[in-house]
Image (tube, grey):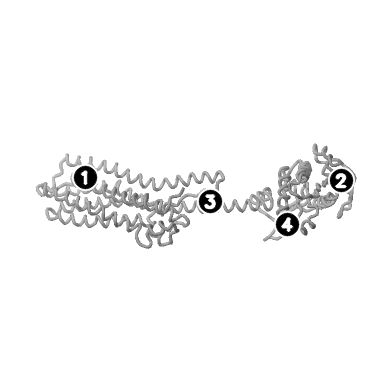
Amino acid sequence: MPRSGASVSRRTRWLMIGAIVLANAIGTLVVVAFALLVLPKPDGEVDGGVLALNLGLAGLYVLIAIPVGVVWGRRLVEGGRDGTGAWLAAERDPDAAQRARVLRAPLRITLMQLALWIPAVVAFSAIDAIVSPLLGLGVGLTVALGALTVASFSHGLAELALRPVVARALQHHAPERRGVPGVATRWLLGWTLGTAVPVFGLVLTGIVAFTNVDITTTRLAIVIVVLGPIALGFGALVTLLAVYATVQPILVIRRALRRVEEGDYTVEVAVTDGSEIGELQSGFNAMAAGLRERERMRDLFGRQVGADVARQALEQEVRLGGETREVAVLFVDVVGSTALAARRPPEEVVALLNRFFADVVDAVEGSGGWVNKFQGDAALAIFGAPLELDDKEARALRAARELRARLAVGSAGLDAGIGVSSGLAVAGHVGAERRFEYTVIGDAVNEAARLSELAKREPGRVLASGAAVARAGEEAVAWALDGEVTVRGRSEPTRLARPAAAG
């Protein structure tokens, strides 16, 4: 069950508080480690009192800066008209300004942390410069490294903490990249902590070596031993944050793509990122929506013209015109439809016809044919076009017998005359360039329609041409030849056949 907006807001608030506290704690640890173990100190100018003063002021500053950062950070994310608190609590979709504020929140948190640490850089540089200008420079640079560390961690942790809120904000919208750092910035921050800070410490040690400060082999070894774990530990941690923030959404998209490949077009992924990753997530959702619409149109198209015709139209170029094909035709026409329409309401007539045509479709498609068109209260079914069938006559005759059996038990509440014929016909797309349909035209179609008219007066309600039965193979034993008739529109007589049971 989806979380409520208030629940998401509370969870994000605590995650943001934890991110701010953790980032400042790590930055403080880096500063202390550099100050005590790495930073070379001018001989004779730094005593225990200076060190104690620096550590005391640092502790006091951090105790003040963290609560200020927590309150300030909450206001940046939740406060004001555009803050998350308003629209999350109201369970509504945020507007453009509110979405932009959510996406830019990690950057704003990072800048806020720098704003808190920069005064510390200035203050400690000034205080220690009174004792020694070189000490002031070293301490100032050390605190600046701590500020970079806090900024790097703050950005990565804030992105992770805000993901549920970003997902809510971008649920119905694509991410707006303006003013939002991208993947390159994320990795640059990882490089800053993992590479730039430790290397800068080594460079600082080398610079001091050119002064009158004596750097012993032991001191140099301590510098290397301290900077190594910082580079490996904190660098790996911030790099893992960048890796997770980049790779995890890609893995989600990869799993979703696998579901799409398996035919599940309902899949969507949450847009949890304002960077290029978010654009990729949003693009996947747009692609899936397009595939869903395409599949819906394809299904609708298939229902309108038949699955085989739809497949052929989608796979090949559709052109007006046709080709001569050997086909078997089944034509079915409702008995007494005019009187039925006069006696019953239109809604009831449509409902009866729909049930009737459902029986027609089941019988025809069950035998491998397809219903080419519905003509009021009649239906035309084709066997052998657009896909070739070797036993099309047998299939059409079998479908006629099955349909008659369905109608005999009154499943649709209607009766109908059924005619079956076979022969040459032209099958193809007929109409205009802007509006056409796939149909079958020819003597076999006319003959089947005329036989269905005659069948309405037959007890068994089914008539087939002798030519169709002659080509039906084993199905022919289920039919009996009996008489002939010259149907309207034809000059040659048609040999009649009825199901053997009805004969």
Which one is earlier in the sequence, the residue at label 3 or at label 1? Answer: 1
- Real-space Cα distance between discs 2 and 4? 31 Å
Q: Residue 430 bears which disc, if any?
A: 4
Q: Identify the residue under disc 3.
A: 288
Q: Mark 3–mark 4 contact, CB under 8 Å? A: no
Q: Nearer the viewer, mark 2 or mark 1?
A: 2
**SS at mark 2?**
strand
Residue drawn at the location 25% of the way across and 50% of the way down: 146
In the rendered image, which quarter is residue 397 located in?
A: top right
Residue 268 placed where, x, y %?
Answer: 50, 50
Residue 304 placed where, x, y %?
Answer: 68, 53
Relative side of 452 to 46, left or right: right
Residue 56 placed where, x, y %?
Answer: 16, 50
Q: Identify the residue under disc 1.
A: 33
Q: Identify the residue under disc 2.
A: 496
- Real-space Cα distance between discs 3 and 1? 51 Å
Q: Is residue 150 visible?
A: yes
- The quarter in which the C terminus is drawn is top right
Q: Name the residue type under label 1.
A: Ala
